Image (cartoon, grey):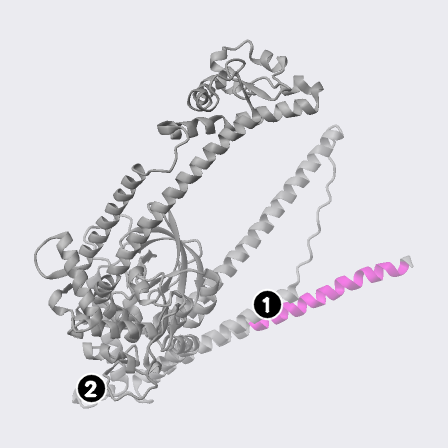
Amino acid sequence: MKKKLTKLSNGKSSYKWQFCSLGGVARVNITSGEDIAHLGELDQKLWTVLSCPVKGLELEERTLDLIDSDRDGKIRVEEVVDASQWLCKVLKDPNKILLGKDSVEFSEINTEAEDGAKLLEDAKQVRSIIGGEGEVVSLPELMEFLAHYDEDRQEELKSLLEDMKLESYPYGENSDDAVAAVNAIRDKMADYYMRCRFLQFHDDCAAALDVSAEKVAEISGLNFATCNEEISKYPISRPIATCVMPVNEGVNPAWQAAFGKVKALVLDVDLPGKESVSEKEWNDIVAKIDAYVAAKADKVKELEESMAEKVKAEHEAMAPLEKLLRLSRDFYRLLRNYVMMTDFYDTTMDAVFQAGKLYIDSRCLNLCMKVTDMAKHAEMAGLSGMYLLYCNCVSKTKHATMDIVAVLTDGDVDNLRVGKNAIFYDCSGQDWDAVVTKIIDNPISIRQAFWSPYKKFGNWITEKLNKSAAEKESKSFESLTAKADSASTTLATQVDNGGTPVAVEKSKKPPFDIAKFAGIFAAIGMAVGYIAGAAMGLGKAFFNHPITIVLFILLIFLCVSGPSVFLAWSKLRKRNLGPVLNANGWAVNAKILVNTRFGATLTDLASYPKIVLDDPYAKKSMPRWLRTLITILVILLIIFGILYFKGYFNRFDNMKALHYDETSVVYRAMDKVFGSVKAELVDAVSDVSETVAESAAEGAATGAETAATPAEEAAPAQ
C-alpha cells in the first residue's frame, strides 16, 4: 500500500531561509540541522530539483530505495521531506547529518521517540553479536552482521534439508537412488512400450520396429565395445505383441547396467521373482516415484520459504538502523544535489549524476552522464546549448556495455568526429573502451567561435582546390588513356594490313581567338591597376592616418567574426544542464547554467612542459629571444613613426625642422615616390590596354577577311 506522504508548504513559512547564488541563479542554502528540520516548510517552487531517478546515480541505490517509500523508482520532494523529518526525530542533534558519517553513537539516538528507542535496541544487539568495544555502530559493521546472519541461515537451511523427514519412503533409505535409477531409463521404457502397442496395431511392421540387420551390418566391422553410443539408440529390448518387458534376458547391452540398477532397487522390491514387467506395472512404479519426488519437493520448498521469511523478518527489523546509518552518510549529499546543486558547482567534488571522466583528443571531459535511451536523450538534450559527445562504452573486465554523454566546454572541435575512439574511466577507476556514436554541435567558447569562420573558409578553399585538382587529374588521365587507346588501335590496324601505315585523322584544334585573349588580358590589366591603386591609397592613408588602417582591420574582423561571436555569446550565456538531466528522467525546477568561466573547469586541456631536448625532426625557427627582440623593435619603430609624423616631437627644438605637414620635404618626397609609382602603373596599364585593343582590332579584321574568302570562291561554283 502506498505510504501517505507529508503535505508540503504552500509557500507561506515563518522560517527564515538563507539564500546563495550558484551558477548565476539564487538558491536556498542548507547549512544547518535546523534548515533540514524545516525542509517541509520550504516552498516547492524554490527547490532546484523536483524528482530524480533511483537508478543510474553515483549514490548507493540501496540508500535511495530506503527513501523511495512508494517504490515508483523516483525520489520526489515529499519523500525527501519525510526522510528529513524522520532523521530529525530519531537524532538528538540534526547538525550531525551535515557531517556525512556512516556511524552513529548510542548517545546521539533520541530514545524519547518510539523509533529512536527501537533503533537503540537494534544497535546494541548488533554490537553484542559482532563484539568490540564502544557504544557506537557503523554501516560496515551492520552489513557484516547481516552478511554473517545470511550465511548462518543458509547453513541452518542446509542442515534442515539433510535432516528432513518425510511421512513415507517408498524404497526406504534407497529411495533417492531408486528415483535416479528409474529416471535414467524412464524415456527408453516409454519408447519400448509404445513400440509394443504399435506392433499390436500393425504386426507387419515388426521388422521396422526392431533393430534391422542393415543397421547392425553398418557397425559389424567395428569394435562393438567402442560403439556403445550407437547401440544405445536401439530399443531397450525387442518389441513383442504381449507388451511386456523381459527382466532377466533380452535387454539391450548398452542399457543392461542401468536396467540392472532398476531391477535391484525397484523391481525386486515391488515385483519380486517376476520374469517380466507389464506396461501397467511399470506405470505404477513411475507414479510411486513421482509422488515421492513431489512430496520431497514440497517439503524442501516449505523449509526454504520458512527460512526466507525468517531472513526477511530479520532484515526488516534491521532496516530502520540501516536507514539511519545510510541517511546519516548520504542524505546531506542528496540535498546538495537536489535542493541546492552545490556539488556540481564545486570543482573539488562530483555531483551524483557525474559518472566519470572521458579522455579524448588531448582533453579530459569531467562532465559525463549515463544514458538509458540514446534517441530520446539526444532529442531533448540538444536544447541545452552544449556541445555533446555520445559514446558507447565497453568493459571487457566487467563484460558490460554502457552509453554515456560527455559535455565538451573548452578547446576546438577540429579532430572530433563520429567513430573516434576514446577511454572512459568510471567513478571506481575502471576503464572502458569508448567510441563516439553521435555529436550535437554547439558553440564551445568565444575563442573557438571567433576563428570558426576563417577555419570554415580555409576548409572550403581546400575542398575546392582538391576538387579542382581531382577534376584536372581525371581529365589528364582520360586524355592519356584515350591517346593510348588510339595508338593501340592504329598499331592493331597496321598489323592487320600487313604493316601498311594507316592514316589517322587528327582532331582539328580550334583557331586562336585573339579577340577573346585580348579581352581577358584587358580585364587582368584593369584588375591589376585597381589593385595597385588601392594599395597606393592604403599606403598613403596609413602614413596620413595610421589609426584608420587599424580601425579598418578591426572592422574586417568585426564583419567576419562578429556574427559568429555574437551567436556563440548568446548561446554560451544560456547553456543549461537542465535539459540534459531532464532527458535522463530528472525533473529540474531551476536553471543549471554553465557559463564560459565555469565551463572551462569542466574540461581539462593538455598542458606540456618546456621541452629541453632538441627534436631533430622539428621545424627549425629563429631563437625565441631573437623573435622577441625583433618584435619589440618593430613595435617601437611603429610607435616612433606614428608619433614622429604626427608632430609629437615639436616640443624639442632640434626636431622642429622635421615637423610633419603637407609642405614638408619628407611628405613631398613620399608623395612623389608613390605618385610616380602610381603614374607608372597607370601608364603601363594604359599602354597594355591600347596594345591589346589594337591587336583585337587587327584580329577581327583578319577574321573578316578569312571569312570572306570562302564566300568569294564559292560564287563561281554556283
Label 1 to label 2, Cα distance in Å? 52 Å
Instruction: Name the kind of residue labelled 2 in the image.
Output: Met
Q: What element does badge 2 sit on?
A: helix
The residue lying at 29 percent from left, 52 percent from top is 310
Tell me the residue that label 2 is attached to: 655
Tell me the residue that label 1 is attached to: 520
Whether residue 246 is situated above or below residue 56 in the rendered picture: above
Front residue of this view, candidates 135 and 13: 135
The tag earlier along the polypeptide, 1 or 2, is 1
The residue lying at 43 percent from left, 70 percent from top is 453
The location of residue 538, given as percent across then percent down, is 40, 79
Query: Would you identify the image quadrant in which residue 359 lies?
Result: bottom left
Residue 701 on the magenta segment: yes
The location of residue 479, given as percent across then percent down, is 62, 47
Q: Find residue 300 and name its label.
A: none
Q: What element does badge 1 sit on?
A: helix
The residue lying at 27 percent from left, 40 percent from top is 159
Q: Residue furthest right?
A: 718
Residue 578 on the magenta segment: no
Instruction: Name the kind of residue labelled 1 in the image.
Output: Ile
The location of residue 516, given as percent across then percent down, is 64, 66
* Region in magenta: 689-716
Query: Would you identify the image quadrant in which residue 87 lies?
Result: bottom left
Front residue of this view, candidates 698 and 611: 611
Front residue of this view, candidates 271 and 404: 271
The location of residue 89, given as percent across then percent down, is 21, 74
Local packing at callout 2 (Cα closer than 10 Å; few below 14, some 14-19, many 20+) is: few
Q: Quadrant of the C terminus?
A: bottom right
Whether residue 473 is situated above or below residue 118 in the rendered picture: above
Q: Residue furthest left?
A: 133
